[in-house]
Image (spheres, helix red, strand yellow):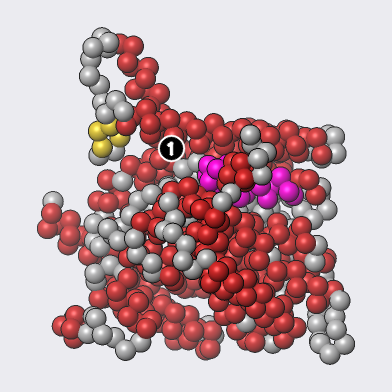
Amino acid sequence: MEEYLRMSRDRPRSHILRWVINSGPDDQILNIFHILGLPLITVVAAVGRTMLTTSIVTGYLVVVAAYITCKSYRSCAAHC
Amino acid sequence: MTRDYVAPVGRDLGWMLRVLSGVVFVSILIPLVWQEYYAIPGLAITSIVTFALGWGLSTRFADADTPNKLHGLMIAATGWFTITIFGSLPFLTISWIVTNPPAIMVTPPPSSSIEALANPLNALFESMSGFTGTGLTMVTNEGALPHTLQWWRSLTEWIGGVGVIVLTTAVLARPGSGSLTLYKSEARSQKIHPSIVSTVRTIWWIYVFFTSLSILLLWLAGLPLWHAINHGMTAISTGGFAVINGSIGAYNDPLIEVVLLPIMIAGGIAFPVHYLVLQGDLDGLYDDLQTRWFAAVLFIGTIFLYLGVLPAYDGAAEALRYSGFQFVSAVTATGFQTATGPAPRSLSAWPTVALLIMVFPMIIGAAAGSTAGGIKIIRLAMLIKGIRFRILSAFYPGSAVRRLQFDDRILDKEEAPREVGEAVIISFLWLVFLTMSVFTLILILPSDAYPLEMILFEVASAQGNVGLSTGITGPESLPATGKIAFIMNMWIGRLEIVPILLTFRALFSWRSIYE
């Protein structure tokens, strides 16, 4: 997956995808989180507040927070 | 003012208007979704007029030179005011249609809030408050506004948070020194990448990402999605417009307040620091001088404010809840208010000492390079270190070679006075304009209607682009002169004064008034 994303970095088909991938931090996982944000809001707008949407949003936010924390921890462990 | 000035300024103003036109056009989706069809003509007219003028200017001056530093400052000053004028058109046109409904349109009954926005000065005030991220409002009941106008208020703050010029630079993607000049003229200095175009794109990447997270967090905390979208946008942009009457205090929900705290604080931290953290460099938070000082100001200021409001509340927990939120809201220049509405005490009923404590964070603001207002923490740090350096000079022999250490830089005997001098000039001018507006309000407001501390609070809130109000600001309570004074305060506060003074200077010398 990572290799595919790296290979496709310079030639995504969508202008929005190209903008996201070329503008953010050099981290494809964060790019995926970024791209997922707006569709998630759209899903919530379409479906409303249900157990499923609440679980998905909670999961998304927890995974984003955990990923950034783990990344920082790994980076600190490598440098400190 | 010769063509040397007019052409680069005109060309870039044209592009800014074209970008605004696109933003207004996309906003037509909102009345379509909410079936507020009467709002579409107002947005369409605004989009067409703005595009026509922008296209005319950018075409007429297409061969203009790359802007130099003076051009950049003038473009920032005139650009922000022009955008504000054209950004007021949706308020004006939609309100006018609702208050004077054509026979073929179904419109809601006009509320007092809509009627207030049909006044051009009120519409301009609302637009300036939005684009500068202030949050003071001419609307008496935000909940009664059509969704389209609620959206337009939030969107102006969201765009204004990172800056109109940053948006235009990202869209134009014009490389070179011209874009750098413009970028710096909008009260920014730090770059994330060597290229300015890459820097503004990364700023937008971070901004959009944080906005999505904020919206989802607020929704999860229990806000309806429409409220979460609008408050997420106005929280991360440290703007402070609400879509409910009584601001955040109307929810009376500690969970929503707790969720908003980190969002507002994130808005007060510089984008380059966010970038470092997203890259995995958590040390970037501590290594950055502004973030360290910001944390210290937050901690110490909240304690002082807590002690100031403690006698006014029934318990320590209640005092901590309101003082903590209001201090963060003030220092980050957000302006969300919880001390209002169903809360035990509104801001106007706070003790004098608490109101005066709140003036300090509203003047200082948060980090430079963030979405916050005020003179910025970096200047506070420079002032304190500069004063300390100067005083300690008395203890050294005249022949001693001393250098001022500032963050990770060592400033020599030429750099130190220049940088300290710049901080002194901005701070001095800030206080001069603050004082002028305080005197203006004392003169125009009914005698004995508002005590001095409330007037000082309100002016500091306007000039610091904060938006907290003790009740002076309103369509009826604030006379027209006061509205004009606040519009000026918000404008000079957003651009840190100097670009506006230089523009007036150029204008006066053009008309030979200055000579």
**Image quarter (top left, top right, bottom left or bottom right) of the C terminus of chain B:** top right
* Residue B163 visible in the picture: no
- Magenta stretch, overall SS: helix
Report which residue position mark 1 lands on: B379
Q: Secondary structure at mark 1?
A: helix
Q: Is residue B495 magenta?
A: yes
Q: Residues within 10 Å of mark 1 (few under 14, many from 20)?
A: many
As drawn, is A47 to the left or to the right of B128?
A: left
* Residue type at tag 1: Arg
- Which residue corresponds to the image point at 85% horizontal and 39% vertical from the top-left? B446
Q: Position of residue B513 (x, y in %)?
A: 67, 38
The part of the image, by quadrant, that contains residue B399 is top left
Nearer the observer, B267 or B315? B267
Nearer the observer, B329 or B77? B77
Q: Is residue A75 magenta?
A: no
Nearer the observer, B212 or B40? B40
Asked if residue B390 is positioned above or below residue B347 in the image, the reply reads: above
Q: Chain of mark 1?
A: B
As drawn, is B13 to the left or to the right of A30?
A: right
Count of numbered labels shown in the rendering = 1
- Which residue corresponds to the image point at 53% horizontal and 88% vertical from the top-left? A46
Asked if residue B515 is positioned above or below residue A62 in the image, the reply reads: above
* Residue B68 visible in the picture: yes
- Which residue corresponds to the image point at 31% horizontal and 57% vertical from the top-left? B192
Q: Position of residue B453 (x, y in %)?
A: 69, 34
The part of the image, by quadrant, that contains residue B160 is bottom right
Q: Position of residue B493 (x, y in %)?
A: 57, 46
Asked if residue B506 is positioned above or below residue B87 in the image, the reply reads: above
Give the magenta-colored segment's residue range: B483-502
Q: Position of residue B268 (x, y in %)?
A: 45, 52
- Which residue corresponds to the image point at 75% horizontal and 73% vertical from the top-left? B93
